Amino acid sequence: MRQAVTLEKTYQERKILARYISSTAQWSTVLSIEHPGAHPARPPASPAPALPDLDHCIIERHDGVYGDPSVLGTTFGAAIDRIFATSYLAGLDYPLLLKAIYGAGEPLPRSPDGHVIIRLASAIVPFSPARRSLYKSVKINRGRAEYYFEPVYLADPGEPDGPGTPARLDVDEFIADMWSKGIRFGIDVEAVRQAIDGGKSERVTVASLLEPRPGRDAHVIEVTSDLHRSDAPLQLANGKLDLMAFQNRFPQVEKGVRLLKKIPCVAGKPGFELSGLRIEPPVPKDTEVTPMAGPGTVVEVTAEGEFLVAQHAGFLNVDSRSGQISVGDKIVSRDGVSARTTGNLKLTGDFEEFGEVQEKRVVEGEGILIHADVFGSIISRGGMVQLNRNLVGGAAHNARGDIRVKGVASGSVIQASQGEVVLNRAESCVISGTRVTILHAVNCEIMAEDVVINQAEGCAIAARTVTVNSAGPRRQSEMSVFALQPDSARLDEVIAAMTARVAQFAVLAQRRKDEMEAMTNEPEVRKYVMLASKVRKKELILTEEQVPMFQKMALAAGPALKAIAKVSLAVKAAETEQQAGAALVEELVRQRVDSAGVSAVTIKRIEGETVVRSMSYNPDGSSIYDLPAKDIKLRLRTTRAEGDMIFAGEEGALDWKSGG
């Protein structure tokens, strides 16, 4: 009963397959599953064996042998094994067979209406043992199969001991024989055909394994040109080129700009051994964009792919060690500042440099942090200037902020217009700032509001308040301290003169007001002014008879009105001068109060000849220390800087305050 059901199922499947093939190819011929006899072109030397029972996935028609496209792979291969055990496929499409079993090669052909067509061969032909004996063994070495082609002879049944009848190999039989010997993939059909047609005795490589094709690793590509620097010379506004500066050394990006894009990995294609065993390709490496996202960037995944995007506008920084890309207000450089790497820099934001700033190079920006030695010039428009190493033969200027040098400052100019200067050791430097703090100063010229030095040798110091733990000369350099004191006498004279001038303008303005009031109170003038005001405001409408009279009144009051207008202008001018003078007096008084503080000099230990003098300055509101470096040196190192003597001695201590 079970066998009957199986036969019935097989019969139904064959009917379905036959109907499918017939409809796909649009053929109207009647399906025939009868097996033909021996191939008419080459009758067998011995009785043909029985044809194999065809599996339900393979069907033979009068126009060829077809495979079921819905049953491929291992099942299809097993069916082919059974066919090649006793038969071969005449007119075999070998590449199509490999595609059907192993999925390797070109896509399966399709009919005009889009259905897959698998026509494997023209017919299934019995492979007699006599013919199979013509095919010898094959030599396999390093993924290659070699076959020695030579003339073959078919045994003559009538003369068993004779030389036999000359025979000819067949490509389709060759494939079937190789299949039964375990060589199923990679047969070079064209090479086999040429060897058979040539008729020569030669060894030919008839099959080769297929090496797996590696895929493509995932990688990241740039999607914006803003990532690249431009080291071309900077073009100035007048069209000339500045050979000391580059066009765009530190790129900037806008908010939302896509910086990088991840290209996904692509799987490789498998290879196959001669036996048909699958050789898997190497697994492609994946990569992630997330580790590349530094501050100011974010990873966005869209339908277009995975991107690294700038969260806000700013400078682009790439960390060569970690590979992170960040966007921030601060520029980070690791190449140093030189004519070769960056040229002179004029930046709009903060700057951090890990390399050296070489001689004659200029770095201009906001906050500036240098981790290596500086031999050039640092110019800040505002923010902190911090040098973690040495400043040698260079300069550091800050318009609105502090300057700190952690190493040694030597032969340099250090000036903070509105900020503090903090140094560890300074040698032969010109230093100025609101407040100057130094651990050890040697042969320096220093001007500030406040100066605090632990040890000073051979320095010239001028400030409102000076505090030194140890002071003394250094070889040929004197140790001089100047207590800055405001010269208020001239300022007091100016305040008194301006106060008197303001009072004069007040008297003049009042006098002109009295004159204007007297002229306005004249009866005719007053009457006309009141009437004209009502007419202008349309509170009074004049009749035709009244208009000539009104015009006559205007002519009579005209000279008086002109005189009143002239006096009014004089009043306004006097009041303007009075107000300007009062504002100036107020500003001068404020300057006088601001400069009236106490000057002080404290030296805890004097070790060698030290001179302390007073130095007057004009309290006009300008800075007492923000001067060019050459002017500071000139004022502190010449006899013109001498003032009243406060102290002169080689030892002891000093604690002096003005007025004390």
Image (spheres, grey):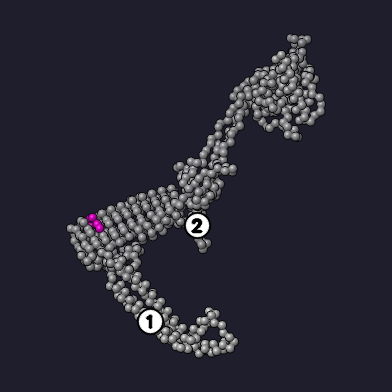
Q: Nearer the viewer, residue 4 or 167?
A: 4
Q: Residue at x 39, y 84 (%)?
A: 514
Q: In the picture, which quadrant includes the N terminus?
A: top right
- Residue 384 is situated, as x and y percent measured from the top left of the image, at 38, 54
Decide if residue 117 is on the left or right side of residue 435: right
Q: Nearer the viewer, residue 120 or 167?
A: 120
- Residue 334 is situated, as x and y percent measured from the top left of the image, at 43, 48
User: Residue tagged by mark 1?
Assistant: 510
- Residue 51 is situated, as x and y percent measured from the top left of the image, at 74, 17
Q: Residue at x 43, y 56 (%)?
A: 365
Quarter-of-image position of residue 69: top right
Secondary structure of the residue carrying numbered label 2: strand
Which stretch did the figure color magenta? 467-471
User: Residue tagged by mark 2?
Assistant: 234
Q: Residue at x 55, y 36 (%)?
A: 217
Residue 217 seen by the camera: yes
* Real-space CA distance between mark 1 and mark 2, rounded to the nearest whole angstrom: 64 Å
Quarter-of-image position of residue 176: top right
Q: Residue at x 58, y 86 (%)?
A: 543
What is the three-letter code of the residue carrying label 1? Answer: Gln
